[in-house]
């Protein structure tokens, strides 16, 4: 194979002046060196969730940490194994390559992986690229447009939906929580439901919870006399006339609960994210 490539390169050099040769450029992803051992676990912390993991050999063990999506635990299955490789693809479409060797005492056990890798993976079956979703949320937060105004107040606090944006199959909601009191507003949860507009008193409310694909902003608490803006990314949707989207915030150990009702007429005002 190497002889063939060398001959091809020489021919290209000989005939390049006459335009008889066309070379297609390629790029190489250099692997990161990684040391592992049998008695300790190495943690690789990625900026986004892990989609796939491939081990070059069974001499290394690799698994996602329990309960999280972006931490990979790696360990040696036996000592003094031959150098092998490890490949990880994350949910932002990036490929990370590692050259794994054995060491009795690895230099690092907890390694934070930066996002400098090139976006290379294309997902099928409708899977979203988490990196692009996060970028859309940043664009929505920096966009000054205010195309809707839905608000509710409770005991010197206010919940306001001021903007709705659309980006392909995503709807992005810019929601502000203002705390005008002297008491910290600790957030129990911020959730979204599709609910019926009307229901009988003796009938349970029909609702379906919609999980955000991404949340931009600290959802723990809002300090006194301040406000905080969140961007929630949800799948693109519209509602039948008898339903609406409820954006609900509940206070931890408190009673300042608020709900915003988003209807179809509000969604139709959504602006393209890059406007």
Image (cartoon, rainbow, N blue to C red):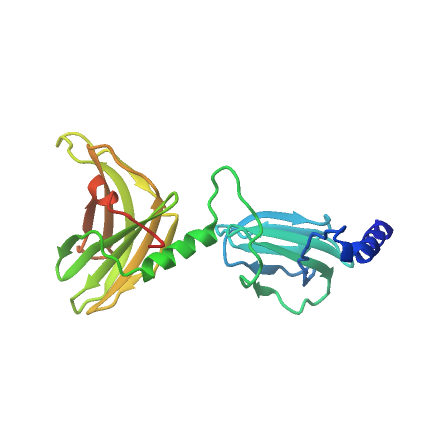
Residue found at the far right of this picture? 3
- The residue that appears at 14% across and 30% down in the rendered structure is 202
165 and 153: which is toward the camera: 165
87 and 9: which is toward the camera: 9
* Residue 252 visible in this rendered orientation of the protein: no
66 and 163: which is toward the camera: 163
Point out the image quarter for the C terminus.
Answer: bottom left
Query: Residue 51 in the image: x percent, y percent?
Result: 55, 47
- The residue that appears at 20% across and 41% down in the rendered structure is 265
Query: Residue 252 in the image: x percent, y percent?
Result: 25, 57
- The residue that appears at 25% across and 68% down in the rendered structure is 223
Query: Residue 1 in the image: x percent, y percent?
Result: 84, 49
In the picture, measured across the screen, residue 159 lies left or right of residue 93, that is left
In the picture, measured across the screen, residue 214 lies left or right of residue 17, that is left
In the picture, measured across the screen, residue 190 lies left or right of residue 70, that is left
- The residue that appears at 57% across and 48% down in the rendered structure is 121
In the picture, measured across the screen, residue 38 lies left or right of residue 237, that is right
* Residue 141 visible in this rendered orientation of the protein: yes
Number of marks in the rendered image: 0
219 and 214: which is toward the camera: 214
Residue found at the far front of this picture? 18
Res. 231 image quadrant: bottom left
Query: Residue 47 in the image: x percent, y percent?
Result: 50, 59
């Amino acid at each position: 194979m190497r002889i063939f490539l060398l001959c091809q390169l020489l021919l290209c050099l000989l005939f390049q002046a006459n335009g008889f040769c066309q070379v297609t450029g390629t790029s190489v992803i250099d692997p990161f060196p990684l040391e592992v051992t049998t008695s300790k676990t190495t943690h690789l912390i990625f900026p986004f969730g892990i989609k796939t993991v491939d081990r070059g050999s069974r001499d290394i063990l690799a698994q996602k940490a329990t309960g999280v999506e972006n931490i990979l635990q790696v360990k040696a299955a036996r000592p003094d194994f031959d150098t092998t490789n490890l490949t990880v693809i994350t949910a932002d479409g990036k490929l990370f390559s590692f050259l794994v060797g054995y060491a009795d005492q690895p230099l690092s056990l907890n390694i934070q992986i930066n996002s400098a890798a090139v976006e290379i993976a294309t997902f099928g079956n409708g899977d979203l690229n988490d990196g692009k979703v996060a970028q859309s949320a940043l664009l929505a937060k920096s966009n000054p447009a205010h195309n809707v105004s839905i608000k509710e107040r409770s005991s010197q606090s206010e919940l306001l939906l001021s903007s709705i944006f659309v980006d392909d199959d995503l709807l992005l909601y810019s929601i502000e929580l203002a705390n005008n009191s002297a008491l910290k507003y600790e957030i129990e949860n911020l959730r979204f439901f599709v609910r019926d507009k009307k229901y009988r008193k003796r009938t349970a409310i029909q609702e379906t919870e919609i999980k955000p694909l991404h949340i931009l902003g600290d959802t723990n608490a809002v300090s006194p006399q301040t406000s905080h803006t969140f961007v929630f990314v949800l799948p693109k949707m519209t509602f039948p006339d008898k339903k609406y989207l409820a954006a609900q915030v509940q206070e931890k150990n408190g009673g300042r609960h608020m709900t915003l009702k988003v209807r179809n007429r509000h969604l139709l005002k959504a602006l393209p994210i890059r406007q």
